[in-house]
Structures are given as C-alpha cells and as structure tokens.
Image: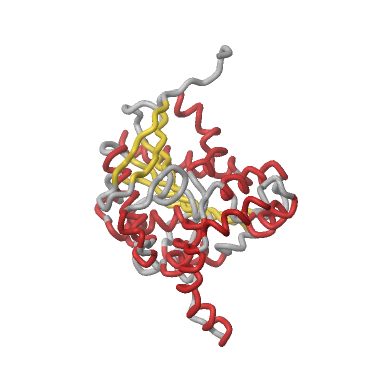
Amino acid sequence: MSVGTPTRQRRTAAVRTDDGALLHATVDGSDDAPVTLVLAHGWTLSQASWDDPVGLLVPRVAAGELRLVRYDQRGHGRSTWAPGDDDPAAVTIDRLGLDMGCVLDKLAPRGPVVVAGHSMGGMTIMCLAAARPELFGDRVRGALLVSTSAGDLAPEPRTPAEEVVRRLTPGLVTAALGGARVVERLRRLTPPSSRWHRRVVRGLLYGADATEEMVRAGAEIMHASTVRSFAVFYPALGGHDKRTELAALARVPVEVLVGSSDALTPVRHSRHLAEALPEAVLHVEPRTGHMLLQERPHLVLEALGRLLDAAVDRVAA
C-alpha cells in the first residue's frame, strides 16, 4: 500500500430479519466512531449503487469520524428472500422499513445514526419512520432522501387503457415469475456491453451530463438483479404511500435531492416531500436523472456531510 493511502476497517455481516430473510451488509469503520451512516439502495440495484459517494467518504471513515453500514435489500444483491415472500402480494415497502430497523438493531445498536436512501431506499426510510417513530430524534439524527417519493407512483387510472393496465398488473407479475428462466435467457442476449442496452438505460435513468462509464456501471448493477426482484417489487412500489405518515421525519434534519431530468421519481415527488417536511432542505440538480448517486456524488457527499456534522454536534452539546 502506498504511503498516504487511507486505511479503513471493513467486515461483512449477515442480518436475519424477524420473518427469515438474510440481509448481506458491509460495515466500514470503527465501532466507536461518533456517528453511524446507514445506506439503503433502490429497486433492482444493490449496495454497489452507493460506491461513488462511499468512495468520497473514505477519509472520514479512515480518520475514525464515521462508521458506515450499507446493505442489500431483500431479494437484491447477496440478500435472500424470506419464506413468506413466495407470495408476491406479501412483499411491500413497509416490510423493507422493518428490515432497515433490523439492520439498525443488529449493526448500529448504540449511538447516533444518520440514514440515507436512494429511490426505493428513501421509501424504506419513510416506512421505518412510520413503523418505529421512537427511533427518530433520539437514535436517528438525520435523513437524506435521494430521487424518491412518499407515494402516488401509481395514481388512480384516468383512462380506460390505464385501468386495463392496473387490472392486468397482478397477472403480468405472475407471468414474469413463471417465465423467469426464459426472460433471463433473453436478458443475456443484450448485456450491458450492448450499445442498445446502454441507450435504453441512459434514456430511462440518466441526465444529459452522464458519461458512458457511469451508464455502463449502473447497467451492470441492474443487470445483476433478478427478474423476480423486478417483478415482485413493481406493484409494491405502486402501493407505497406514506404521504400522511412523515411526522417522525419532521423531528430530524432532512435533505432531499432530485435530478431535474428524473423520469422515475420526477421533481414533483420531491417537492411534495419538502411541503410535508417544511424544515427539509430541497435541492433540484439540473441536467441530472434518477441515478443522482453516480451523476453527482459530490452533491451527495455535501448533503451527507451536513447531516453527519449536525448529528455529532448535537451529541457534543
């Protein structure tokens, strides 16, 4: 190792949830660091989606200022499903909130915590706040919500065609799960190295300034996900609605980041969050899409830095 290279403690951990899923987690930093940061990723991604901001946090971890926990959501990355998840209707974003609570109980049982979530990970934080509000203000001292929504991702159908789609969705999920092997074989025909694959991913998830390297890295993370995680969580995202259950988050500093070109969770969703949390800081980043973690990691770092400093300052006071 070259002189001057930051060093950090790293270990992996397995968190068993109360319903039997096994969550794969990575822990960086000392157990006696003054604050712990817990990161949750989005739909069809994994903890690797946080790699760019995490890389920028290495100096704080190496200096003993920060302990970092990130994990794969159930059914994503190296985490498993629970036995009850065989019924797709049982999989909800509320359940992911309870999972995050299990991660905090096992891997951050003491001391101040800041939580951060991207997309479905932000929804996970909202569900944790609704299910376990006592954590917020005491243990959880701040929250970063990136490219996310409190609800209304599947609004009531406004046309006959939209009503047909709504009625067909359960059947489409069943069909996708039943034909998962066939779909997986088809996916292998268009890997992330395919120009067509990257063009589709760029159009859906990235802003005008995204580089080819960013798009390919994101495409590879998503490609490693399974058809099952895509199909099962699609209706769960539509059922997520915490617009009237954000009171616990109002007790702590909250920062909301969104890209102006986000097509999956458009800016209006972040504006609704800011309206529901009047003390929250909202930042709309131009020329940026849904994958803001990759596109603007320094912006994420700055928001996290403010939240982490505030959490530590409160302890010192």
The image quadrant where one finds the N terminus is top right
Please determine whether, in this image, residue 118 is positioned above or below residue 10.
below
Dividing the picture into quarters, in which one does residue 251 lie? bottom left
Q: Nearer the viewer, residue 8 or 66?
A: 8
Please determine whether, in this image, residue 46 is positioned above or below residue 132.
above
Q: Residue 24, image x and y in percent? A: 39, 40
Please determine whether, in this image, residue 304 is positioned above or below residue 190.
above
The image quadrant where one finds the C terminus is top left
| Residue drawn at x 37%, y 62% as measured from the top left | 92
Q: Give the left or right position of residue 161, taking residue 156 as reference.
A: right
Direction right: furthest residue:
195
Direction bottom: furthest residue:
160
Q: Give the left or right position of residue 108, taking residue 117 as reference.
A: left
Q: Give the left or right position of residue 200, taking residue 8 as reference.
A: right
Q: How many marks?
A: 0
Q: Residue 94, image x and y in percent? A: 34, 60
| Residue drawn at x 61%, y 45% as measured from the top left | 220
Please determine whether, in this image, residue 46 is positioned above or below residue 290.
above
| Residue drawn at x 58%, y 44% as measured from the top left | 299
Q: Residue 161, image x and y in percent? A: 58, 84
Q: Residue 197, image x and y in percent? A: 69, 53
Q: Nearer the viewer, residue 195 or 124?
A: 195
How is the model colour-coded?
secondary structure
